[in-house]
Image: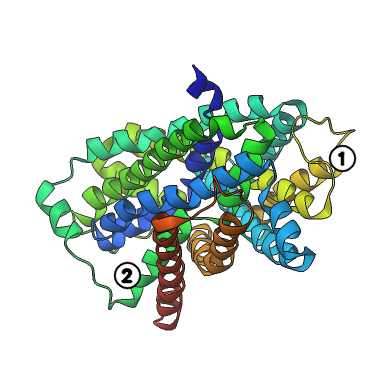
């Protein structure tokens, strides 16, 4: 019962991590490279836990958000640099989520502007009229629709021999492969995740006595999010790639759905696909928009809690609403949504050095001795962060220079 009371921030941020853009990236990976990128998804499970566990530790022990700690420890200039990367990542995320929902709407004959209007109205009404716990419960309920991709994975009937062959193949000299590796890293470790979970545990009122259970919350979430990513990748690999449909156009969400419908049927290809994408997009839209409002508030100092009414924290709700509306307007403009999603994930990979460096330094400087990152685990974390950030940037630049974009 205690775990159920503590659980939430980790599950929410991890389910949001598997957002519409991440799922589209995973689908592109499976369609282009089959099961070859499956190993990267497995490796990212402990990595995303290590990163997010530090945010939990910082938030629970200090009772302060990520931007607030950076401002206190490194000054207002560094705080604005960090929050600027956050705003860029959140803006990209909101556009990604809106595009995913608009794509699903188009599958069912709903104009993009209608889908965008409904999403904006839903998000604003839910956040403005709710408390933190209510928003958290709604977000988890929406995120659980992502389990649909585990069902489609089973229905796709992947061949064990092909899966094993993909796990053993790592073509690191191919620029197209490296570009998708970078996109997958950026799709799993996102700057806004760090800010959101730290602010969420503070807003929920968790303290040091909840740290162990909050870590379990994060660990379970990390496993679930990567299983969903694997579910999408295997679904597409077992249908399109396995049947040599490598030339199939995947420029829209509808094209991805239509492509797998030929092999899985309309129920899995359209209904389950739609539910999974919409659930993933909505929970991520909630998280990304709230993160932007929290992050800017932590630097500027305005009131920033879902426990405050709009009249008590007007700027918090204004920033939240503006971020959501801007994302909707970009999507209505009619840009190539799938290509945009891949660019957003690669951008996240390029921002990782800034985000992860601040996270590591805070874990070393902002915590009391009992909770401080130290000993051998300190070097494990440093190695993981350095390798992940470096490879993410290297893979992104290699893919761009190699003409994969």
Q: Residue furthest front?
A: 369
Q: Is residue 390 left or right of residue 202?
A: left
Q: Nearer the viewer, residue 15 or 389?
A: 389
Residue 108 visible in the displayed image: no
Q: Residues within 10 Å of mark 1 (few under 14, many from 20)?
A: some
Label annotation for residue 172: none
Vertical comparison of 5 with 366: above or below: above
Q: Which residue is mark 2?
A: 177
**Which residue is at the far bottom?**
401
* Left or right of residue 235, residue 20 in this image: right
Q: Position of residue 163 (x, y in %)?
A: 17, 52
Q: Secondary structure at mark 1?
A: helix
Q: Position of residue 326 (x, y in %)?
A: 72, 53
Q: How many marks?
A: 2
Identify the residue under disc 1: 314
Say which quarter of the image contains residue 30.
bottom left
The x and y percentages for residue 189 are 48, 55
Q: Quadrant of residue 366?
A: bottom right
**Vertical order, 253 against 114 (above or below):** below
**Left or right of 17: which side holds 191?**
right
Q: Dot 2, how many residues are within 10 Å of its Cα: few (below 14), some (14-19), or many (20+)?
A: many
* Residue at 81% in and 31% down: 308
Q: Residue sitting at 48 percent across and 24 percent down?
A: 3
Q: Is residue 203 above or below residue 339?
A: above
Q: Nearer the viewer, residue 170 or 341?
A: 170
Work out whether mark 2 precedes mark 1 in sequence or the reverse, and give the earlier one. Answer: 2
**Secondary-structure class at tag 2:** helix
């Amino acid at each position: 019962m205690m775990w159920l009371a503590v659980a939430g921030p980790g599950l929410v941020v991890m389910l949001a991590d598997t957002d519409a853009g991440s799922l589209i990236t995973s689908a592109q990976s499976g369609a282009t490279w089959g099961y070859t990128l499956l190993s990267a998804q497995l490796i990212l499970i402990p990595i995303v836990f290590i990163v997010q566990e530090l945010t939990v530790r910082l938030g629970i022990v200090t009772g302060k958000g990520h931007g607030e700690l950076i401002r206190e420890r490194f000054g207002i200039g560094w705080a604005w640099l960090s929050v600027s990367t956050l705003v860029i990542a959140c803006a990209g995320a909101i556009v990604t989520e809106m595009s995913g929902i608009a794509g699903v709407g188009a599958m069912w004959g709903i104009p993009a502007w209608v889908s965008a209007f409904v999403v904006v109205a839903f998000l604003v009404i839910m956040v403005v009229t709710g408390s933190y716990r209510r928003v958290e419960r709604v977000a988890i309920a929406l995120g659980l629709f992502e389990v649909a991709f585990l069902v489609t994975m089973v229905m796709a009937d992947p061949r064990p021999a092909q899966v094993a062959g993909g796990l053993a193949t790592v073509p690191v000299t191919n620029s197209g492969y490296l570009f998708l590796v970078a996109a997958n890293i950026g799709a799993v470790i996102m700057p806004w995740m760090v800010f959101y979970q730290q602010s969420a545990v503070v807003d929920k009122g968790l303290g040091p006595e909840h740290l162990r259970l909050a870590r379990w919350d994060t660990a379970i979430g990390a496993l679930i999010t990567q299983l969903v990513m694997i579910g999408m990748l295997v679904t597409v690999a077992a249908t399109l790639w396995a049947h040599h449909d490598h030339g199939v156009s995947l420029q829209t969400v509808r094209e991805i759905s239509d492509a797998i419908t030929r092999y899985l049927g309309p129920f899995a290809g359209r209904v389950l696909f739609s539910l999974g994408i919409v659930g993933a997009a909505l929970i991520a839209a909630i998280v990304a928009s709230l993160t932007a409002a929290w992050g800017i508030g932590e630097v500027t100092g305005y009131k920033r809690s879902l426990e405050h009414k709009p009249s008590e924290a007007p700027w918090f709700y204004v920033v939240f609403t503006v971020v959501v509306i801007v994302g909707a307007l970009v999507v209505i403009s009619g840009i190539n949504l799938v290509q945009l999603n891949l660019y957003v994930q690669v951008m996240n990979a390029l921002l990782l050095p800034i985000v992860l460096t601040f996270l590591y330094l805070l874990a070393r400087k902002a915590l009391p001795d009992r909770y401080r990152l130290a000993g051998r685990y300190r070097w494990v974390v440093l190695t993981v962060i350095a390798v992940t950030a470096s490879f993410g940037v290297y893979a992104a630049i290699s893919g761009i220079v190699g003409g994969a974009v």
